[in-house]
Image: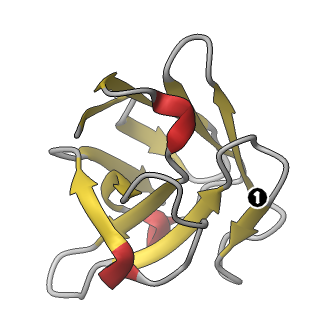
């Protein structure tokens, strides 16, 4: 299995940027597609972005398309989420997650087996 740990969250003004990182340990990172999800207070956890094992395919929620970019560095066992033009509605706890090895990248939260503890992102207006 794989262990995940997010970092890079914080407080930023609207229009600003943050880059989240998710470091993986355990079995070979390159076997896993990776995803980012977020959960705002009082709301369900929602899909943000996903990336295939090679990084060649990426997926985004409509709400972040054009503002967020997902990437990965398999040599560093790390996946990133670059967040630009942040809005107050982006405020949430952000989680990285991985499905079972060799599963395709997906927007479906039910397919994700491994989760990090999350990192708080707060965007002030």
Q: Is residue 97 left or right of residue 86?
A: left
Identify the residue at horizontal 37%, vertical 77% (top origin).
111
Q: Position of residue 125 (x, y in %)?
A: 48, 60
Q: Is residue 47 left or right of residue 116?
A: right
Displayed quadrant of residue 42: bottom left
Mark 1 — residue?
67
User: What is the crowding at mark 1: few (fewer than 14 residues within 10 Å), some, or many (at least 20)?
Assistant: some
Identify the residue at horizontal 74%, vertical 40% (top origin).
54
Q: Is residue 48 left or right of residue 97?
A: right
Identify the residue at horizontal 44%, vertical 26% (top origin).
28
How is colour applied across the structure in the image?
secondary structure
Displayed quadrant of residue 3: top left
Q: Position of residue 32 (x, y in %)?
A: 49, 46
**Circle 1: element type:** loop
Displayed quadrant of residue 41: bottom left
- The foreground one among 9 and 22 is 22
Identify the residue at horizontal 52%, vertical 64% (top origin).
103
Q: Is residue 19 visible?
A: no
- The foreground one among 27 and 22 is 27
Residue 27 drawn above or below residue 32: above
Residue 81 drawn above or below residue 46: above
């Amino acid at each position: 299995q794989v262990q995940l740990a997010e970092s890079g969250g914080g407080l930023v003004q609207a229009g600003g940027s943050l880059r989240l990182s998710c470091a993986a340990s355990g079995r070979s990172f390159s076997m896993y597609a990776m995803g980012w999800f977020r959960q705002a207070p009082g709301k369900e956890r929602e899909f943000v972005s996903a990336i295939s094992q090679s990084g060649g395919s990426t997926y985004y929620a409509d709400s972040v398309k054009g503002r967020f970019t997902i990437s990965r560095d398999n040599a560093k066992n790390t996946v990133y989420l670059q967040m630009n033009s942040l809005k107050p509605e982006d405020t949430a706890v952000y989680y990285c997650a991985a499905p079972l090895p060799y599963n395709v990248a997906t927007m479906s939260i039910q397919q994700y087996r491994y989760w990090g503890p999350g990192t708080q992102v707060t965007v002030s207006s």
